[in-house]
Amino acid sequence: MVLSLPPLSVEAESLYEKLEAFVTDHCIPSEPIFSSQVSSTGFNSIPPILLSLISTAKSLGLWNLHLLSTLSHLDYARLCCVIGRSFLTQHATNTTAPDSGNMEVLHDYGTPEQKSRYLAGLKDGSIRSAFCMTEPEVASSDARNVGGTTFARSTRDGRPGYFVNGRKWWSTGAHDPRCRFMIVMGKLVSSEGEKEKGHTMVIVPRDCPGLRIVRDLTVFGHDDAPFGHAEVEFKRCWIPLENCLGGEGEGGRIAQSRLGPGRIHHCMRAVGLGERCYDAMIKRSLEREVFGKVMIRHGTMQSKIAEGKGRLETARLLTLVAARAMDERGNKGARTDISLAKILVPRMILGIMDDAIQTHGGAGVEGELALFYGAMRCLRIADGPDEVHVGVVARREAKAWMERNGKL
Amino acid sequence: MVLSLPPLSVEAESLYEKLEAFVTDHCIPSEPIFSSQVSSTGFNSIPPILLSLISTAKSLGLWNLHLLSTLSHLDYARLCCVIGRSFLTQHATNTTAPDSGNMEVLHDYGTPEQKSRYLAGLKDGSIRSAFCMTEPEVASSDARNVGGTTFARSTRDGRPGYFVNGRKWWSTGAHDPRCRFMIVMGKLVSSEGEKEKGHTMVIVPRDCPGLRIVRDLTVFGHDDAPFGHAEVEFKRCWIPLENCLGGEGEGGRIAQSRLGPGRIHHCMRAVGLGERCYDAMIKRSLEREVFGKVMIRHGTMQSKIAEGKGRLETARLLTLVAARAMDERGNKGARTDISLAKILVPRMILGIMDDAIQTHGGAGVEGELALFYGAMRCLRIADGPDEVHVGVVARREAKAWMERNGKL
Amino acid sequence: MVLSLPPLSVEAESLYEKLEAFVTDHCIPSEPIFSSQVSSTGFNSIPPILLSLISTAKSLGLWNLHLLSTLSHLDYARLCCVIGRSFLTQHATNTTAPDSGNMEVLHDYGTPEQKSRYLAGLKDGSIRSAFCMTEPEVASSDARNVGGTTFARSTRDGRPGYFVNGRKWWSTGAHDPRCRFMIVMGKLVSSEGEKEKGHTMVIVPRDCPGLRIVRDLTVFGHDDAPFGHAEVEFKRCWIPLENCLGGEGEGGRIAQSRLGPGRIHHCMRAVGLGERCYDAMIKRSLEREVFGKVMIRHGTMQSKIAEGKGRLETARLLTLVAARAMDERGNKGARTDISLAKILVPRMILGIMDDAIQTHGGAGVEGELALFYGAMRCLRIADGPDEVHVGVVARREAKAWMERNGKL
Amino acid sequence: MVLSLPPLSVEAESLYEKLEAFVTDHCIPSEPIFSSQVSSTGFNSIPPILLSLISTAKSLGLWNLHLLSTLSHLDYARLCCVIGRSFLTQHATNTTAPDSGNMEVLHDYGTPEQKSRYLAGLKDGSIRSAFCMTEPEVASSDARNVGGTTFARSTRDGRPGYFVNGRKWWSTGAHDPRCRFMIVMGKLVSSEGEKEKGHTMVIVPRDCPGLRIVRDLTVFGHDDAPFGHAEVEFKRCWIPLENCLGGEGEGGRIAQSRLGPGRIHHCMRAVGLGERCYDAMIKRSLEREVFGKVMIRHGTMQSKIAEGKGRLETARLLTLVAARAMDERGNKGARTDISLAKILVPRMILGIMDDAIQTHGGAGVEGELALFYGAMRCLRIADGPDEVHVGVVARREAKAWMERNGKL
């Protein structure tokens, strides 16, 4: 089958243009204001400038873009490239992880009650959520290792439910003052303390007694306030049975379903951020003079730009192709393409960022480029580290070869 | 403007399928026969198996695909990926360099007489040609350096013409027994011996007195018989005025016009050859056992496969995007994309080949993979070395940035 | 001349052993205490644990190792590898930049009065200093660009002196509460406002009116308290003539003399830190299990370890060779070796750190590895960015070739 | 233990100087003569120029340097760097594989009769030998896979002996007209056809009935005449019992003992060849002009030179360190260092060669640089491919870490 990439749909084209204007005219100029507001409020409140951006995005029809069922994955990917240029845009448009994924999961697996209690608030932005999967004690890149968090059946006041016990980390958004609940992955334990094999997901309200935020994690020294990444302790947190999400033992399947698109959304935004850093590198190389000529006239600088352009286009194309594959063959059919993008996009964008840092000299290591670098570096670890996706690609390519050559 | 890649046209789809069958069923199986025939006939004659393939290609409607005006660059690129899987296919379908480029040049710039004398024969495959540009004495990657070959106006027997003097090398196809003429790039010299600034192209018949093939060049030890790469000496070769191609001083412009598409055609075929080597690598990794398990189960092997898949798709996508850019914006408007593909495609495919060699061990360095590697390595030098294209990309990207930011 | 590396001298051997014990038994265990103390005192005071380490180092004879005239550069390099394993050791042993370099400069170029006023305090650790060279407005990697800071001759109260005006950044140690003076590089200006061509260095007391710390710079988000990196403003700071260091117009020569060894000291410590990260990577790979086996049994993990070992040894060897070259041929004669180490050591160690981060997953991006990575990344920029050293190596190698071949 | 590299011994110093003169004045100038003589005689005879070089080397005391028991591994390594600059030198000084290794094996394990029949001739250069280990049918990088060649006990004319059956390839030197015997590794089979577990080595005379050279293998298209690499078939070759080398079942141990030093000898010579290519690159960059300036003034060219210098010194240092480790800790104790050099030296030198090819443009792919590249590429496969040595380093480093940390 020969690859094709359809043009933007008419609907997507209009959103694309509005988004470009929103990012350029509103989000990027708001960044320094946001930083300055955050530096005084920390995790305690949402900076007013973000609330104002949210209101603008809503009025422009740029809210909840990921929920537009009329957009193909390919078109949403294109929009995400624009969104990624400013880290504020995803928050302003309600398309940020983990809320976007949590919305999708609640939409697909939630009971009517769960939807009304949690999904509605996420959709209108009045509440936020976290997702608790990774555990500090085990190599969570192998999902089968995740199991230190347990759900023990226990009736309280005549109401059947579970005791949640365990420790999670990298729970993004847990610090957000608007955060109201966490989706927690773990394992059911029998009354004899034996763990079931598969995973289960439950909803734990943020104010559930026994739930404690142990500390905020930093990413290359940055605390990502006011959203943050938390280490969370669950100590005999009791929740009712109806807080189970999608059924007992269904956790693995749900996790898988949210990870496919999630990975690609990260990649899409990464490309947008990469574009921005690439532009910054060119800008700097045109402004500064060194050893008698403008930087861009030096061969070593030109190499960085040509490499950067190659990296940027490679990252963009691999992401678009993965999105297109999801449109054509579904999440599962697109797994090779998704893993390929997941491996290569962060590597490419980190390459651009590193060269942009070098081009900026001292200003590179102390400003936003260093911040972006740290955030991007996480992408080689989050949602399956490189090594896991290498295995996925290799196994699937071997199988594809065998199919092509009649060995299967 | 957002990238899209239209699907194959109906016409291209039918050609694509026929080509796939032709390559798989005829060309690849003919390779060992070709090699064995060539090893006894060398530069002296065309192996019968190739003549037979030519006849098959003609009967299947796969002849002169590059001349089909109804094919977009994008669709021709897709076909070339298939063509590239076997080095025999380009010879069997009359789409090989330098004849394909020479046909295009004669078509665009040739006089009616030049067309009837030279173009007709190239098109039906009865004659072959060479292209003489690079000179051994100078760094020809800077075209302005090319000037050791001169055309001195001189009337003979009352007929105005030129004396051609100089030395060229890397004249591909010059050894071919069917070769009848060479297109030679050089500089006009006045009677005082002063060289004009621009370049001029002329046609020199293969049997012109004074034209001597000095030696055959090898590529990583391979002589590429029966086509070959020659070093050619022109010693007072007289040609009539009407052998000038496209007008005096027009050589630079003509060279430029042929190089754009030519570069992409090379890239397209390179991707096809890369696919083949990638498949060979997977095949080997499934067949051999080492340290207690099939090779593919080793992590280092899986890394090679995932890297290879990434390289293959990167190379393919960059080439398709460049072809698409040529469709949308012409050769000149697509120059950044062409240069990017020209830099990255050979690098990617060489990476695949190198890993395939490593996977094959001793069989890697002595068989066809080593031959392919050598041929591919040339692509980082031919049609402008990497370093030249790096400069093109950097300069154009700087200009694009200035345009986007209102600095131009 | 064939390379040799003499064994440790008897004196160095004894220091080496003492240092190893000091680092392992005192410095590394003190790191978490230091971090915790700093997090409450910031830039305001020196954490008690550091004062205690200083006292231990003094009592062990590990103070001011860089001033031991009996140590060869090679032996000092070997000691610095040990020092580098903990960032506290350089502070505890008084061998840290910029004080170590400032001590050397004062020792070589200072007047008796400058020595008694500034050098003595630096040597006994009672005071600290900063070095102000880089300017935010220009590409300071080309030292000739440095010139926004000016010294205007001006007599005050009958005393000849200078007005210092300008802005510097990356003034390491300027925040330290013990900091008493800064060595500032700039240009003399005539009364007509014309700048002299060469550079001059002066000493500006920390409490000089007009000297203002504009802000503290962060490195990948880390403020490096209590030492810090500052942006400093000089606004009509008046200093007497005798604060000129080494004579007017001598600034360039002094800067050069301190940079040679300084670069190598950085490299030496980098290797020590690299060793530590490499060890952490192996440790983690032995402790965690993923996909059914201990990480180290995975081929991709083994590749990281073998690569890491190669990087570590490469970095160590190139540094030792540069130090040996300084012993044999002086700073100038060793310039190729110094530049080579300066280019490659940070690259190698960053490679180790990046793999160590990846091996640690989430713990990699939030802990000390990320902090180390940021600090190491600066080394590709500080003391001449890679690009400058590439030029040095290339020019000197070309000259060496010409000498070897009788072309000079 | 801190690394040191003792200076050249007095004896080695004198050999070093003589070798340098021999290589520069005799070997390199003889190369084109050798090539021209070989092109007419092929595998049929030894070119007279080589015989003349052999006679010169003998008269200068440069014969059998590898047998000088007074030389440390470190000093022999330094000599091999010089030897490697011209491929003729190893043949001229009798230090070439596989003869040098075969001499060592016969010296250590041979019976008095084997020594007089085979070792004497190898030492005086009157005869040559081959070594048959690798088999085309299996991944021989895992030595345990080698077992397709069998030795069946069988008495003939009352004389106990073996029938040798099997197929080997990459038997270097088998084509040499002076070749008189092959050392063959295989497995004993019982009369019931059961293979023993360990390996055994035997000596098979070149003229043994049933021994047939199936074909000559090429390396990247080059046949390496007159020495060559052969595929060899053994079909019921009978040899007497006394042709067993070192005892039945001892083959594995012998193979291991020859591989350690052999690997380092290859690396040493590789560094010498790398030096030569590096010099050629600088030379070219000083001679050619492109885009208005001499190549060396372009930043991209300077990067190649600085990279090349770094690669050259890295390769040299890692080899010297491995040789020094062999002196200090024996072959087994030096295994990590040997494997590290084995992995990195070919990679570094290939990097230099590739850049040198690029710098030479068309002259790079058709001349000696391409030939060198192909030969060097084999080193990543021969004597254990990279992947095997990666495993060695990782396992030993893990063990070393555990020892350092009291876990073993």
Image (cartoon, coloured by chain):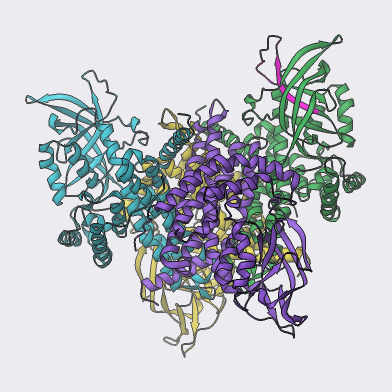
Chain colours: A green, B yellow, C purple, D cyan
Q: Does the magenta portion include A199?
A: yes
Residue drawn at (18%, 28%) of the image: D163
Q: Residue furthest bottom?
A: B192
Which segment is the magenta one? Answer: A182-200
Name the side, left or right, on which D291 lies relative to B367. right
Q: Is residue B94 above or below residue A179?
A: below
Q: Is residue D393 above or below residue D250?
A: below
Q: Is residue A192 above or below residue D40?
A: above
Residue drawn at (23%, 53%) of the image: D226
Residue B53 image position (x, y, % from top left): 44, 48
The N terminus of chain B: image quadrant: bottom right
The C terminus of chain B: image quadrant: bottom right
Residue D338 image position (x, y, % from top left): 37, 44
Q: Residue furthest left?
A: D157
- Residue D283 in sight here: yes
Residue drawn at (89%, 32%) of the image: A121
Name the side, left or right, on which C44 lies relative to D66. right
Q: Nearer the viewer, residue D347 or A253?
A: D347
Name the side, left or right, on which B211 lies relative to B84. left
